[in-house]
Image (spheres, rainbow, N blue to C red):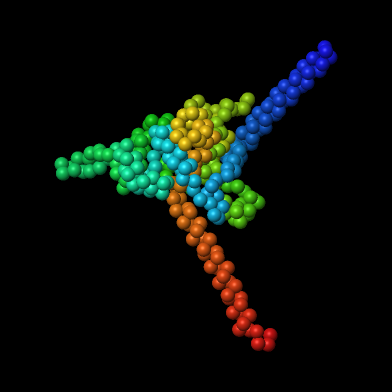
Amino acid sequence: MKKLVTSIALIAAMAGLGASSAAAEEGHDLAAAVEHAAAASHYPIFKPHNVEWSFAGPFGKYDKGQLQRGLKVFKEVCSACHSMNLVAFRTLEDLGYSEEQVKAFAAEYEVQDGPNADGEMFTRKAVPSDHFPAPFANAEAAAAANGGAAPPDMSLLAKARGVERGFPTFVFDIFTQYQEGGPDYIYSLLTGYQEPPEGVTVAEGTHFNPYFAGAAALAMAPPIADDQVTYDDGTPQTLDQYAKDVSAFLMWAAEPHLEERKRTGFMVMVFLAIFTALVYLTKKSVYANKEH
């Protein structure tokens, strides 16, 4: 019996040692990756995760339920700092909302209008034709409230952000029609916050994130955590799910006509295939009786 207990204890100790060694090795590898990225001034340290999106591929479509959840995350979390100036409330009907629901949603915001008859600006409740109002009066106010750097507008963020995938990956992307670099990057950034590895220090007021494309750390603190936003459809309220939902929503905000574009592209490809076949058959028919 003593031998059995001793063996179990030895195995447990070896397993713990192995786990500690693996963790130490992972930390060492991360520290080395940070050092390499800093020396080459090439970020991000890690490439973004490849997430499975419903809108990926030539026949991809938006998941309206996911887009509605992403809108909720944006409204309750992101809109406190980030603007979305190019998106009008009326476009939310594409997410499955009725006209009345859109009117009610817009009325929750106030926008500046004017001048009135007295030449003065005034505020009023937003209507569907208005765009999402910015949380700050101007870029200078936004910068002053965020450590000197104004948070970027999120209207086109999913198309403006992305990481070069390099050779030979970009060759395969031509055939798979990979265009999800922005959502992959946003998702990876939101879920990538962690403590810096041993030996790596970051500037005061910044937060280590190996998926940030500008440096090893960024000024934005982790913006969201588990159970921060309440979902009404039973979807898990986790950081991972929040990140996926808001990334998908920002992709829609940047490219609301993606589904229509893909349908048009497919029809064009079919037309070109048929046209090529007809040209070939015509050529065969014209030159069938001619000597070569």
Q: Where is residue 46 in the image (x, y as percent from the top left)?
A: 61, 38
* Whether residue 74 is visible: no
Quadrant for residue 78, please give it.
top left
Instruction: Quadrant for residue 77, please give it.
Output: top left
Q: In this view, does 86 lie to the left or right of 30?
A: left
Image location of residue 81, percent across then percent down: 40, 34
Count numbered badges in the picture.
0
Q: Identify which residue is drawn at 51% across, 50% down.
A: 61
Provide residue 55's location: percent of width, then percent of height: 52, 49
Q: Which residue lies furthest to the top in this view?
A: 2
- Residue at image location 36% in from the left, 46% down from the top: 98
Is residue 113 placed above or below 192 in the rendered structure?
A: below
Q: Is residue 66 shown to the viewer in this render?
A: yes
Quarter of the image with the C terminus in it: bottom right
In which quarter of the view is residue 125 placed?
A: top left
Q: Which residue lies at the image location 61% right of the left edge and 76% below the top edge?
A: 280
Q: In this view, does 93 lie above or below 197?
A: below
Q: Residue at x 59, y 28 (%)?
A: 196
Between 110 and 81, the one lying in front of the other is 110
Q: What residue occupies the far left of the structure in this picture?
A: 118
Position above or below: 2 against 41: above
Q: Which of 45 and 155 is in front in this view?
A: 155
Q: Quadrant of the N terminus?
A: top right
48 sits left or right of 133 in the view: right
Please name whichever residue, 182 or 289, is drawn nearer the observer in this view of the structure. 289
Compared across the picture, whether 54 is left or right of 12 comes to: left
Against 200, residue 165 (above or below) is below
